[in-house]
Image (cartoon, grey):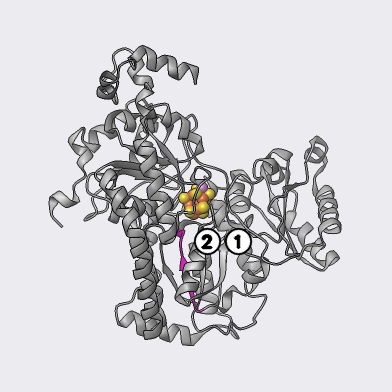
Amino acid sequence: MTTEETNCEASEAMSPEALKEEMLKAYPSKTAKKRGRQMVVNDPEAIPEIGANSRTTPGLITQRGCTYAGCRGVVIGPIHDILHITHGPIGCGYYSWLTRRNMAKSVNEGDTNYLQYAMSTDMLEEQIVFGGEKKLKQAIQEAYDIFKPKAISIYATCPVGLIGDDVHAVAKEMKETLGINVFAFSCEGYRGVSQSAGHHIANNGVFKHIIGLDDTPQEHPYTINVLGEYNIGGDAWEIDALLRKCGIHVVSTLSGDVNYEQIKNAHTAHLNTIMCHRSINYMAEMMEKKFGIPWIKVNFIGADQTAKSLRKIAAFFESRELSDRVEEVIAQEMAALRPVREEVTARCKGKKAALFVGGSRAHHYQDLFKDIGMEAVSAGYEFAHRDDYEGRAVLPSIKVDADSRNIEELTVEEDPQRFRSDFVDKKKRLEDSGFTFSDYNGMMVEMKKNTLVIDDISHHEIEKLIQIWKPDIIGSGIKDKFVVEKMGIPCKQLHSYDYGGPYAVFTGAANFYREVDRMLHTKVWQYVVPPWQKSAGDMASPRHAPDKREKPGTTDASAESIEQAA
Ligand code: CFM
């Protein structure tokens, strides 16, 4: 690569080092030191170490969620025929009620889909003082009597951990009483530094209580699981349809539009493919140890990445017929997508994005922007770990701190009956021919030199970034969407998709290109006066000032009155 190709253009305005200093200036020295470690100037050739997965400093406005959110909300909640009961005060249940767009539909008449329900034990003062186990038992019985589910899962919220209710003992007792699978999660909100801890706890629970319960073999020659795909806005449906078109069978998607039976049978697949590394790498590792199923990282976000992922899956199966079919499908899909991609690229090429999302999308969505000639000048995760930034090669050097030690590491051993040693031989043979397994190289190697990578970004830092580097679009979530848009920059919600989507695979990519094009080119932004433009002594030049001068009747005063009226 030439220097021109690897250098980030935004550095021409203010260097990333200077921008970082500018962001840190407002903090007390101890906070600035800590935040400083979580902001690094990227060099894909010599990836710097980034501080990640550490506690947010109180007072900073973070985008993070809690451990309960990661467990109940993200990983297990989407399993649509398990009855999910939140043990805690009503708020935790209420705020996990349909707030994430993990869609599911009942395929057959009479299929169970509990996603539209929110069940809670509605803990009150009496239970906080005298204990809540009795009420939990009653709730499980009541839920069972009404719904007769196949399985019930219990989630502990903060007060449950504080008063010491034994949710696991209750689950065990009710499992025996009711004769159905009942299991519990110690996923109290405070248990980890973010929702990331909840992912790990959820993976452990699903692995212990569901995986491997049904050994019915799959007849299909090419079977995979799609791990870390949650069907936000219907993504998993698009992925599933594309794979089916290629002749690849998905045994289970964890956990987008999936049912209990599919997860019980997931260990019969030939291969695990991982979409979101952060939330589900534990599961892939444990399944490989116990059953010998190898895993590869895939990405179905972005047309080029989707094609690459399909080719890799086909290569794994070593079938000429399958590879030919995959090439045929890629050619068809690309041909359909090309006109939209070219049209949008002509308008969006060279524009700059900054993405701050979760634990995987800040990376994956850079590929969709790349498809249309746009570059990420800055990006960061909310709660990912160093391996998601720097690649799994750094795993052995990640220090285990008290917070991560809080999360159980399961000891997993080979299953004497079900371990597939033939899979191990195949893996070895493929590796010898250059095929890579269990690899995720992280976000930073794919970002240009001198881009600014920021972990757990705060509102203050986003404001500085917008003010000084002026990206054309921010990819983020609801917690900062409107703050960002009041600064005159479009903000695409990459968690909820602004209630749109799907964006996965080729069909979804077309949706995304069009939406970004519309957001970038609507004229509304020129009427917005960012806060720093209103204050005295402002260091930045007014954003979109030329537009305002050009348009009669859009003086600062009228722009301000529009904003006040809104
Ligand atoms: Fe994985 Fe996710 Fe994400 Fe995530 Fe999430 Fe999500 Fe996300 Mo919101 S599992 S890490 S905890 S890809 S809910 S579907 S969009 S923060 S980047």
Task: Name the residue rendered at 47%, 73% in the picture.
Answer: 245
Q: Position of residue 58 (x, y in %)?
A: 50, 32
Q: CA distance from mark 2 to mark 1?
A: 7 Å
Above or below, 222 against 340 in this view is below
Residue 92 place in picture, x, y as percent: 67, 42
Which residue is at 41% across, 74% downward?
313
Q: Earlier in the sequence, mark 2 or mark 1?
A: 2
Looking at the image, is 272 positioned above or below residue 514?
Answer: below
Residue type marked 1: Asp
Report x, y in % for residue 287.
Answer: 53, 72
Residue 39 visible in the snapshot: no
Q: Residue at x 13, y 51 (%)?
A: 3
Which residue is denoted by mark 2 in the rendering?
Answer: 236
174 relative to 501 in the view: left or right = right
Q: Which mark is residue 257?
A: 1
Q: Which element carries disc 2, helix, strand or loop?
A: helix
198 left or right of 446 in image: right
Q: Looking at the rendering, which quadrant does residue 371 occupy?
A: bottom left
* Residue 220 on the magenta span: no
* Residue 256 seen from this side: yes
Type of residue at label 2? Ala
Give x and y (percent) for residue 46: 23, 54
> Helix, strand or loop at disc 1?
loop
Q: Is residue 160 found left or right of 317 in the rendered image?
A: right
Which contiguous range is marked in magenta?
A: 270-277
Q: Residues within 10 Å of mark 1 (few under 14, many from 20)?
A: many
